[in-house]
Amino acid sequence: MLSSWLENESGTTFPRIRFLLIYVKRGYKGKTMGQVIDKTYNGLKVPQGDKMTFKDGKPVTPNHPIIPFIEGDGTGRDIWKASVRVIDAAVKKAYGEEKSIKWFEVYAGEKAKDATGEWLPEDTLAALKEFGVGIKGPLTTPVGGGIRSLNVSLRQIFDLYCCVRPVRYFKGVPSPVVAPEKLDVVIFRENTEDVYSGIEYVAGSAEAKKFIDLCESLGKKVRPDSGIGIKPISKFGSQRLIKRAMEYAIERGKKSVTMVHKGNIQKFTEGAFRDWGYELAAGEEPFKTKIVSEETLWDKMDGKMPADKILLNDRIADSMFQQVLTRPDEYSVLATTNLNGDYLSDACAAQVGGLGIAPGANIGDDCAIFEATHGTAPKYADKDVINPGSVILSGAMMLEYMGWVEACNLIHEGLAKTIQQKKVTYDLERLMSGATKLKTSEFGDAIISNM
Ligand SMILES: NC(=O)c1ccc[n+]([C@@H]2O[C@H](COP(=O)([O-])OP(=O)(O)OC[C@H]3O[C@@H](n4cnc5c(N)ncnc54)[C@H](O)[C@@H]3O)[C@@H](O)[C@H]2O)c1
């Protein structure tokens, strides 16, 4: 069933998720420091520990949660070895024996193909579904053969509609701009719609012709040799993403949420995204009380923002690319559509010099997967040289999401100090003067000793 889904480039995924639900109905037995869950996935036994649960889209974290991890292909192996040590050390330092992560390996990518014959085995999906929160290294996307990106597959299967990319500067990281520390934003990118929804037809196909004919019947001219791609943006999809961004801003006391869109041109998709955002903010609590739109600010408040409120504004995407360079400190939380968010996340990460260490998460209402934002960099595989920062910081994000903020802060502190001591992996060392080049494993050690 899974392989047929993977080969289906345009079909909707939601009906196919149903088969996963049967797995969550399996029973448990025993109870000590965590439950004994007498099960195996991909032939591996589940460790003793407890399951994460979710309430109203938010995680409820036990003291010893079972967290599935996907090691990742290529350099993923070295990166994971270093990252898991850093994450465990932070948890131990913050909470002693009171809390710990019970790691559970699940296979995906090349390792899964070798062990099970599948790129993304059903057992892996079932384990992620059951345990709710997972972390992954980079995965190879097999080229050709009609196989979808495993990353895109995971996002769609679990309806991880919210891609979260925090972008902040770590002092000492080489950056192409003069004041990289001024940019400190969290980007919420819609993850399931837009031109990524997979509704695409090659030029000359019968399907493309059907769409072209349909357009003509509506009085629109499309060249007959056109490829066709469809851009669906729904009110439901937009509002649940913008809601997450606004909730985040309220919880963390952020000063603003900016909707980034291209609504001046694409009025009924990108423009509607913005309108639905304002509608949500004006119509629902706690947003009605907490959030002030830019229009209200100027029409009714003389431009004076009350200290306890959060500003909701919007910017056209092309102007936003200028704004993050010219007025970075005016922005805080950004909420945007899928394609804009894809471009903007990497542009912002590059601005703080952190493309190789940028963390990311894909979050839904009952599942969240934290991941490296770079690829598998296969030429450096198993050489113990690659920068593990992206997975380490994704691990810190995961801890914060679980409510283990103290452990998250320790990782940030350890990483920041290590970079300030100019102890870095090759990718940063070659751009810094007087830096010490560390191996992947040594970089992990240095972060731990700096916590
Ligand atoms: N999230 C993911 O799993 C993900 C993302 C992008 C690409 N990929 C896959 O990775 C494979 C290789 O893709 P690619 O070569 O286009 O991109 P890549 O990110 O793997 O590598 C490009 C270059 O960036 C540098 N680089 C990447 N990560 C680094 C790190 N942690 N430390 C230091 N330098 C780093 C290296 O110089 C590398 O050669 C492909 O199969 C692709 O599909 C996976």
Image (spheres, grey):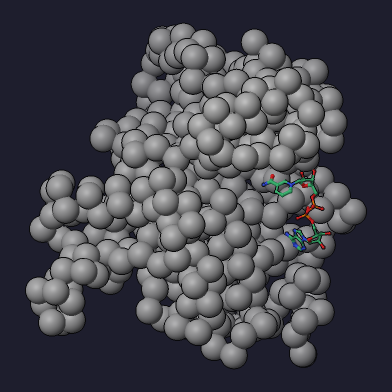
Residue 96: x and y in percent read: 41, 53
Foreground residue, 419 or 46?
Answer: 419
Would you say 285 lies left or right of 319 here? left
Whether 356 is drawn above or below 206: the answer is below
The total of numbered circles placed on residues is 0
Let me know if residue 63 appears in the view: no
Would you say 275 lies left or right of 102 here? left
Residue pictured at 29% horizontal, 61% vertical: 249
Whether 164 is drawn above or below 195: the answer is below
Residue 295: x and y in percent read: 21, 69
Residue 359: x and y in percent read: 57, 57
Instruction: Work out which residue is located at the far right of the displayed protein and give it.
Output: 379
Q: Which quarter of the figure has residue 41?
A: top right
Residue pictured at 27% horizontal, 33% vertical: 55
Foreground residue, 155 or 201?
Answer: 201
Q: Which quarter of the figure has residue 421?
A: bottom right
Residue pictured at 41% horizontal, 81% vertical: 329
Residue pictured at 49% horizontal, 14% vertical: 15
Foreground residue, 125 or 87?
Answer: 125
Whether 106 is drawn above or below 378: the answer is above
Foreground residue, 451 or 303?
Answer: 303
Residue 445: x and y in percent read: 66, 64
For the N terminus, the quadrant is top right
Let me know if residue 159 appears in the view: yes
